[in-house]
Image (spheres, helix red, strand yellow):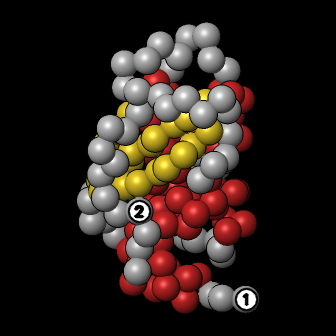
Amino acid sequence: MFTAAELIHAYSKDPINNYRIENASASFLQKNSVCGDEIEVFLLLETTDWILIKPDDDLSNISLDDLLIKERSRYWNPAIQTVAAASMLAEEIEWKKVSEVMTRDYQYMKNLWLDMSPRRRRSVVTALLGTRNVIYLLTNKIIQWFECVL
């Protein structure tokens, strides 16, 4: 078992998915006011029928159970805890149903690695909150509060 420090170092040293997705279904700039981190999260979504979702598509008749995360990326250069958590999250949610991702919270992130201090918990969930906000953006509901994932 790795320590939190070892995982953070490994994932932040060689982060995955650090780019802007061209033609993303949507993106969202998530800010963490505690440490000043900003991370822009991009999602490319696809229906279970293999139809790509475009930014202007109407999703009102599509269930979150019928949407898959085809690709997730992030852009910016936040704190190493945020980079590591974003990389781990990218690995975990690719090709998952959007409805499943919407249930993720700090406990889920904690299960991926070790518990963090209360101050660092926001860093761990910044990418997760940004990911959920991309989905909320597509469904016209934005959440800004970390409490929903902590």
Name which residue lies at 55% across and 29% down: 51
Residue 103 versus residue 25: which sits nearer the camera? Answer: 25
x then y, percent, for residue 45: 51, 37
Within the image, what quadrant is residue 57 found in?
A: top left
Counting residues from the start of the chain, the first of labels 2 and 1 encountered is: 1
Residue at which label 2 appears = 17
Within the image, what quadrant is residue 117 found in?
A: bottom right
Residue 115 versus residue 127: which sits nearer the camera? Answer: 127
Name which residue lies at 41% across and 54% down: 73
Residue 86, above or below 61: below
Q: How many marks?
A: 2
Q: Label 1 amino acid?
A: Met
Per the image, label 1 sits on a secondary structure element best described as loop
Q: Label 2 amino acid?
A: Asn
Can residue 23 be spotted in the picture?
yes
x then y, percent, for residue 27: 36, 38
Can residue 147 be spotted in the picture?
no
Residue at which label 1 appears = 1
Using a 10 Å C-alpha cutoff, classify the residue at mark 1 as few (fewer than 14 neighbours), some (14 to 19) or many (20 or more): few
Q: Quarter of the image containing the N terminus?
A: bottom right
Using a 10 Å C-alpha cutoff, classify the residue at mark 2 as few (fewer than 14 neighbours), some (14 to 19) or many (20 or more): some
